[in-house]
Image (spheres, helix red, strand yellow):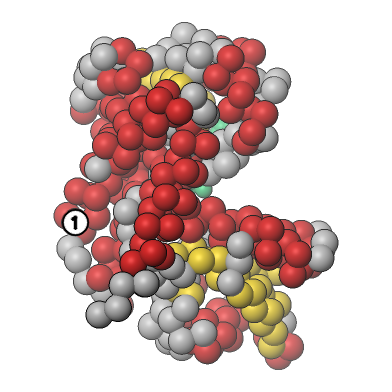
Amino acid sequence: MQPFEEMARLGHEQVVLCRNDDVKLRAIIAVHDTTLGPSLGGCRLYDYASEADALRDVLRLSRGMTYKAAVAGLDLGGGKAVIIGDPSIKSEALFRAFGRHVQALGGRYITAEDMNTNVEDMNYIRRETAFVTGTGMHYQGSGDPSPVTAWGVFHGIRACLEVVYGSSDVAGKKVAIQGVGNVGFHLARFLHESGARLVYSDINHRNIKKAMELYGGEVVEGDDFFKSDCDVLAPCAIGGIVNKNTIPMIRAPIIAGGANNVLEDEEADSQRLGQSSITYAPDYVINAGGLMSVHAELRGHPHEKAMSDAENVFNTVKRVLHKAQAEGVSTITASNRLAEERIEAVARLSRLRV
Ligand code: NAD
């Protein structure tokens, strides 16, 4: 990969390599676009097979954050960080060293939790910089964002039901949730409280048991999740599960869940979904509640503000689905266009002298 060419192709502003040999820190921070505000995105700790893989991941993920914040209507740009290393070897010093690099960017990048990093790690980073979110209560942090994410997903599901069935009423509708972890569990609660019927699929049987005891429902294993005779498939576990092999099995008219990167191949799979008349709520639109949670934290807004922002995912998902219909494009293309239109409109404002 030619880094500068790749940055130009994806539209990145800045990529920073960070190292500290004493604590074996090797990290990359990517600032994609700061038109709408400081770049924000999680810090992922992962044992990448190569530095090129790490760079590819951070470039892709940071660009995704720009689109996510833009469609969510937040005054944030897109950024992301990856620490290259074994997730089982974490230390205070590692995260504090990373925090010093974040501080050196002077607020152009704000970090948060991501894969293999948690509140405790953010607390270490907070000792070196204020440009971190998702810290614990001790730092007036917003803590676990998953209830807000699930609240947004719940309202995104309602929007899909309205567009597909003509009513956003969840009562009596059957929703199959893959992954009853942090997001999936809260989603199950919101759906249950609104009278939905639930189906669960999870490799962790303890998580299923807990949800079954509290909210009832059925359990399916493996590929039976895709074949489930339900109204909505809600992927809330891992990415890449909707692909050329699974799409032919899907009977639900709607896919709307909290997981990131649900489509294995964005372009080809959105075409396949269109051909099968399956409505797909783009992942980064419907799961923006977590970002809204940290945005509220940054602005010093109460938790209720994050929840009301997440409720607005209903309107955003509807806008995306209507735009896709009106312009004859996939829902992913429609949401990408919405993001680009907002960024361009705000960029044009800078011509206005004040
Ligand atoms: P989590 O680890 O708490 O839960 C994931 C659940 O999925 C677990 O119960 C796990 O056992 C299950 N699972 C893993 N692989 C599976 C498989 N192959 N089949 C069935 N179940 C499987 O994670 P989470 O925080 O709930 O996040 C879930 C997804 O939502 C991820 O893709 C994450 O990136 C995305 N997301 C989360 C948030 C958030 O606020 N937590 C925000 C935005 C997006």
Residue 63's quadrant in the figure? bottom right
Amino acid type at image mark 1: Lys
Q: Is residue 67 left or right of residue 289?
A: right
* Nearer to me, 350 or 139: 350
Considering the image in quadrants, where does the C terminus appear?
bottom left
Considering the image in quadrants, where does the N terminus appear?
bottom right
Is residue 206 depicted above or below 17 in this figure? above
Is residue 208 depicted above or below 98 in this figure? above
Is residue 38 depicted above or below 174 in this figure? below
Residue at the (58%, 28%) spot, across then down:
270
- The residue pinned by badge 1 equals 305
Query: Exactly how many numbered labels are in the figure?
Result: 1
Q: Is residue 124 left or right of residue 136?
A: right
Q: Is residue 29 left or right of residue 37?
A: right
Residue 245: x, y in percent? 70, 20
Can residue 324 be seen at all in this image of the molecule?
yes
Can residue 48 be seen at all in this image of the molecule?
no
Q: Is residue 11 left or right of residue 283?
A: right
Some atom of ligand 1 lies within 8 Å of the CB belonging to the residue at label 1: no
Is residue 74 depicted above or below 250 in this figure? below
Residue at the (37%, 57%) spot, across then down:
345
Residue 351's quadrant in the figure? bottom left
Residue 168: x, y in percent? 24, 22
Q: Residues within 10 Å of mark 1 (few under 14, many from 20)?
A: some
Residue at the (73%, 61%) spot, across then down:
6
Residue 164: x, y in percent? 35, 16
Residue at the (52%, 89%) spot, across then down:
104
SS at mark 1?
A: helix
Residue 288: x, y in percent? 38, 48
